């Protein structure tokens, strides 16, 4: 069995990004060449595997792609040398080379695509790739002519892997599950992160229960909830603990953490750099231990890394319900 | 009848309380989109960022993802780290990926405090957004950007270096204009990640880089316009560390045998939370939902007073601190983020571009 198919290719230059460089005329005319760019993604690094996927929602249906991904060598497209081509970050240049077929993906295995069919794509693609490589920027894609593919007997068929369909955004086409693989292939874990899904594809939120049922139940649990709220209220921290935390943060060099023990009012008056300079000077850290001199005052003596000492009296209060530093007096 | 009315009132009160408790338990959930043109280093960055943040340090903060995604991200990092291999493949347009992460804090227990997702895509898609006829894919991408809570833009350090050397690569200014135009249509905070800092730092000070960038009118205008949202940071990062790559002509190559040592790759993520909170406090989103503020309130965070810096013509900053009832794990996260911001501002005072622009001009 043979079929009609159009060569296509998506690749990039050393500085220009990925783009379709060879496209069937009917897709270009319908301004749907972008479909080839977005539907061509590398599913496997296994050499020789050809990915086949349906394209749903395009100008013509049925439509499918059969493509392979190659790391481009210069001589493949008639460029000088045999070196692998690289972009300016030293990454391999990949080419997505394949065929656009007016068939559902599930029928592609039956036409018997061969390596020769894909080699014909390379031949059709080479001039456009050379043009892209030399231009150094985006080029206008070239239109491809239809080929007759498949039907060759005697040649070993290609290893095909049918993947999830590509759905043109904004169309009413529905995803169909990928059919079973046509032949056994070594399993690779899919190991793919979550593909993005539009809001429309997400399952609808479960409706909330409302009304009388909750009302009746709520009346029964109200007292329990109130008790629960009270029970889980955070225990107050002591003034001494706040002073201890300050010393702990300073010893770790976490001046920011120490600063966060102060009240919003204090922070409004004193910036972090000033606070840090007052206690540590230009040192990254210092050690201290607090002494409570009143229920709301603590004395600290910060021994800095450079050997100097800074004494301070901390004023402690509960402006927001928890003990915080509300003032700091430096002592000589 | 009276009984029914009483039941209805009680039900309303209880529903309100339950909803309030429920919202306080909901973890933070943010979408971060990193925009940038091809070869700007977005994909390498995500691998290094995950590698650096997957193990908690003294702060206890770390990020996690599914084993499959972790395997893929570590594969990206290992490919980057191996000097016998090329850098990971560039991202094709069809390979747009959203990486979901969970933010966790380890203390006596491990607590999940938030989620964020990171959108990675082919940079060249940006150009299509401004092509003659945007296609459905680019429109969808644009909507994703618009829906993101925080936008970060990757500025290619290699391109910036060439610009500083007065030999910019073709399209540099056009691409920068496109990037800034895209960011300007976003009403949420934007931070700029200056990638490949390792190849810049030996030749230029950070201040020199900032001053030269601000000489580009579109760049300076963009920074000035960000004042309304609070801050706009330029964060120098290196996904590979000093000396890992060298320039060969107009390209970069790994130096054989060098060990990867990413620098500050966690800072853009750490800045995201405080910057988004400050921004939302200044300007709740158009729908008035102020989702982040609701979360902050539920977590009893003290957002402090927004300090308007008059010398900076209105540049704003605020100190976010845990409140008395803030869950311990959230307190740790907030301290971690604030600490990272403080250290960035200590080491690179010019990183707050809005403040720098208005204090020093260009």
Image (tube, grey):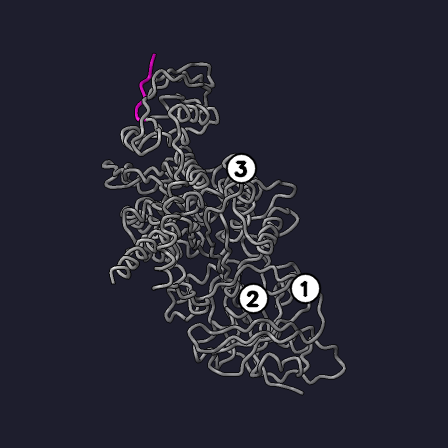
Residue B3 spot, x, y in % from top left = 28, 59
| Quarter in which the N terminus of chain A is drawn | bottom right
Q: Nearer the viewer, mark 1 or mark 3?
A: 3
For mark 2, what is the residue? Answer: A41
Kindly tell me whether residue B83 is visible in this rendering.
Answer: yes
Residue B52 spot, x, y in % from top left = 54, 43
Kindly tell me whether residue B211 is visible in this rendering.
Answer: no
Residue A230 marker: none
Distance from Cα at disc 2 to Cα at disc 1: 14 Å
| Left or right: where A185 falls relative to A21 | right
Name the dominant secondary structure of the magenta segment. strand
The subunit carrying tag 1 is A
| Left or right: where A76 falls relative to B3 | right
Furthest residue toward top: A332
The subunit carrying tag 3 is B
For mark 3, what is the residue? Answer: B108
Residue B206 spot, x, y in % from top left = 41, 38
In the rendered image, the vertical position of residue B237 relative to residue B94, given as above or below: above
| Quarter in which the C terminus of chain A is drawn | top left
3 and 2 marks on the same chain: no
Q: Residues within 10 Å of mark 2 (few under 14, many from 20)?
A: many
What secondary structure is marked by label 3?
A: loop
Furthest residue toward bottom: A1
Q: Residues within 10 Å of mark 3 (few under 14, many from 20)?
A: few
Residue B118 spot, x, y in % from top left = 47, 54
| Left or right: where A131 falls relative to B217 | right
Image point (64%, 77%), residue name: A120
Image point (34%, 37%), residue name: B319
For mark 1, what is the residue? Answer: A46
* Magenta segment boundaries in residue numbering: A326-332
Residue B186: quarter of image: bottom left
Distance from Cα at disc 3 to Cα at disc 2: 44 Å
């Amino acid at each position: 069995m043979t079929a009609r198919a159009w060569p296509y290719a998506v690749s990039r230059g050393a500085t220009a990004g990925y783009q379709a460089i060879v496209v069937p005329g009917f897709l270009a005319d319908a301004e749907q060449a972008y479909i080839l760019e977005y539907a061509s993604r590398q599913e496997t690094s296994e050499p020789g595997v050809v990915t086949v996927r349906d394209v749903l929602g395009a100008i013509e249906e049925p439509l499918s792609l059969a493509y392979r991904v190659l790391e481009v060598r210069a001589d493949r497209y008639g460029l000088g040398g045999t070196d692998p081509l690289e972009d300016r970050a030293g990454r391999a240049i990949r080419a997505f080379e394949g065929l656009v077929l007016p068939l559902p993906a599930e029928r592609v295995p039956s036409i018997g695509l061969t390596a020769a069919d894909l080699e014909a794509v390379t031949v059709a693609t080479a001039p456009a790739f050379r043009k892209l490589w030399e231009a150094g920027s985006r080029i206008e894609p070239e239109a491809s002519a239809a080929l007759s593919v498949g039907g060759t007997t005697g040649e070993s068929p290609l290893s095909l892997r049918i993947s999830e369909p590509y759905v043109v955004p904004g169309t009413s086409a529905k995803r169909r599950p990928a059919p079973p693989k046509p032949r056994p292939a070594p399993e690779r874990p899919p190991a793919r992160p979550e593909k993005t899904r539009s809001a429309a594809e997400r399952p609808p939120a479960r409706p909330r229960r409302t009304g009388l049922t909750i009302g009746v139940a709520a009346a029964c649990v109200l007292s329990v909830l109130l008790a629960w709220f009270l029970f889980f209220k955070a225990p107050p921290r002591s003034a001494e603990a706040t002073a201890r935390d300050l010393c702990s943060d300073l010893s770790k060099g976490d001046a920011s953490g120490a600063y966060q023990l102060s009240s919003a009012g204090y922070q409004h008056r004193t910036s972090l750099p000033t606070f840090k300079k007052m206690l540590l000077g230009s040192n990254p850290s210092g050690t201290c231990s607090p002494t409570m001199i009143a229920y709301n005052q603590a004395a600290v003596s910060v021994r800095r890394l450079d050997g100097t000492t800074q004494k301070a009296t901390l004023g402690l209060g509960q402006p927001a319900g928890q003990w915080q530093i509300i003032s700091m007096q430096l002592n000589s | 009848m009276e009984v029914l009315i009483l039941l209805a009132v009680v039900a309303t009160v209880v529903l309100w309380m339950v909803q309030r408790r429920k919202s306080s338990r909901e973890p933070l959930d943010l979408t971060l989109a990193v925009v940038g043109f091809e070869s700007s280093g977005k994909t390498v960055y995500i691998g290094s960022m995950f590698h650096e943040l997957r193990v908690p340090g003294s702060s206890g903060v770390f990020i996690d993802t599914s084993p499959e995604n972790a395997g893929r991200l570590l594969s990206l990092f290992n490919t980057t780290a191996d000097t016998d291999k090329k850098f990971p493949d560039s991202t094709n347009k069809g390979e747009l990926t959203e990486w979901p992460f969970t933010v966790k804090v380890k203390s006596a227990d491990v607590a999940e405090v938030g989620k964020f997702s990171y959108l990675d895509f082919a940079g060249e898609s940006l150009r299509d957004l401004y092509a003659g006829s945007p296609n459905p894919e680019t429109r969808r991408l644009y909507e994703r950007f618009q829906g993101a809570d925080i936008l970060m833009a990757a500025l290619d350090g290699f391109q910036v270096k060439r610009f500083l050397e007065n030999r910019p690569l073709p399209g540099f200014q056009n691409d920068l204009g496109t990037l800034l135009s895209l960011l300007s249509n976003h009403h949420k905070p934007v931070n700029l990640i200056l990638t490949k800092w390792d190849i810049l730092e030996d030749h230029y000070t950070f201040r020199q880089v900032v001053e030269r960038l601000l000489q580009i009118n579109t760049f300076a205008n963009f920074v000035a316009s960000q004042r309304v949202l609070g801050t706009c940071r330029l964060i120098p990062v290196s996904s590979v560390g000093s000396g890992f790559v060298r320039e060969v002509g107009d390209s970069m190559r790994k130096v054989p045998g060098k060990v990867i040592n990413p620098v500050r790759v966690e800072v853009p993520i750490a800045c995201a939370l405080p910057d988004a909170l400050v921004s939302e406090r200044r300007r709740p989103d158009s729908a008035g939902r102020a989702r982040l503020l609701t979360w902050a309130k539920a977590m009893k965070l003290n957002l402090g007073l927004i300090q308007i810096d008059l010398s900076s013509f209105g540049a704003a900053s605020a100190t976010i601190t845990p409140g008395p009832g803030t869950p311990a794990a959230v307190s740790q996260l907030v301290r971690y983020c604030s600490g990272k911001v403080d250290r960035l501002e200590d080491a690179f005072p010019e990183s707050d571009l809005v403040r720098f622009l208005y204090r020093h001009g260009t």
